[in-house]
Image (cartoon, helix red, strand yellow):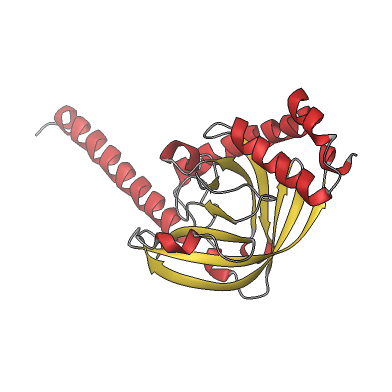
Amino acid sequence: MGSKARRPLRALSTVLITSGLLMLIDAGLTVAWQEPVSAVYSHFVQGQLGDDLRELELAGPTDVDLAALRSLEDERARIAFLARGLRRRSDAGDAVARIRVPSAAINKVVVNGTDGASLRKGPGLYDDHPFPGAPGTVAIAGHRTTYGAPFRRLNRVGKGDEITVEMPYGTFTYRVEKTAIVDDSAVEVVRRVSYDRLVLTACHPLYSAAQRIVVFARFQSAEPRGQALKR
């Protein structure tokens, strides 16, 4: 075989070797950290969501909500009213909150909804569950290996750790009671109980959806913000 005939073969072998190395690097990054392509996407989207959240905070309640707030003197009632109002007018994928879990290195904008498109943006508040400030169980889901892997280190959360969720109308603090590993069908983990709480869920173990890791945290305090402060 002449040198000219061997050149295309050498070029092809170089491409195949390079592609193989890139695939190995991608797999290594996924195992050691997270899937790199979706991580870049998530970083970009989270930046946009941060801007959206700031705009939401500046916009405040609607005129109708403001009129109703004037009749509510109790701070807890005002916060609950604003929580219900924001849930009512938020669409799937909208930025609505920021969650901070120092023990798991979590500091992410939270969106409304847990459908596939919403969770590609960041952690999502469960449908048919209240926003923080309204009575009941607040539930948030997040990915562990793709799309920024916001809940990748959820297994590091321990009893007594603090979790805060910042909403436009208040900052809510929760204290972790326990963590658990459950089947993916265990919907009872997000049921309403006799006290207000926060539940975080994610797939478990890493790279599998066979089970769920669940963090249960009890409501501790609420610090009103924005219109919730006004009388």
Which residue reaches farthest right? 231
Which of 89/163 is in front?
89
- Horizontal arrangement in the rendering, residue 136 relative to residue 223 (left or right): left
Which of 217/15 is in front?
217
Residue 203 percent across, percent down from the top left: 42, 59
Q: Is residue 21 above or below residue 194?
A: above
- Horizontal arrangement in the rendering, residue 85 relative to residue 39 (left or right): right
Q: Quadrant of the C terminus?
A: top right
Residue occupying image coordinates x 37% and y 58%? 207
Which of 16/214 is in front?
214
Question: Which image quadrant is residue 185 in?
Answer: bottom left
Q: Is residue 110 above or below residue 102?
A: above
Q: Total number of numbered labels?
A: 0
Residue 54 percent across, percent down from the top left: 74, 34
Q: Quadrant of the N terminus?
A: top left
Residue 155 percent across, percent down from the top left: 52, 68
Which of 76/140 is in front?
76
Residue occupying image coordinates x 18% and y 27%? 4
Question: Which image quadrant is residue 161 in?
Answer: bottom right
Which residue reaches farthest top? 63
Which residue reaches farthest left? 1
Q: Is residue 114 above or below residue 213?
A: above
Residue occupying image coordinates x 72% and y 39%? 82
- Horizontal arrangement in the rendering, residue 179 relative to residue 79 (left or right): left
Question: Which image quadrant is residue 157 in?
Answer: bottom right
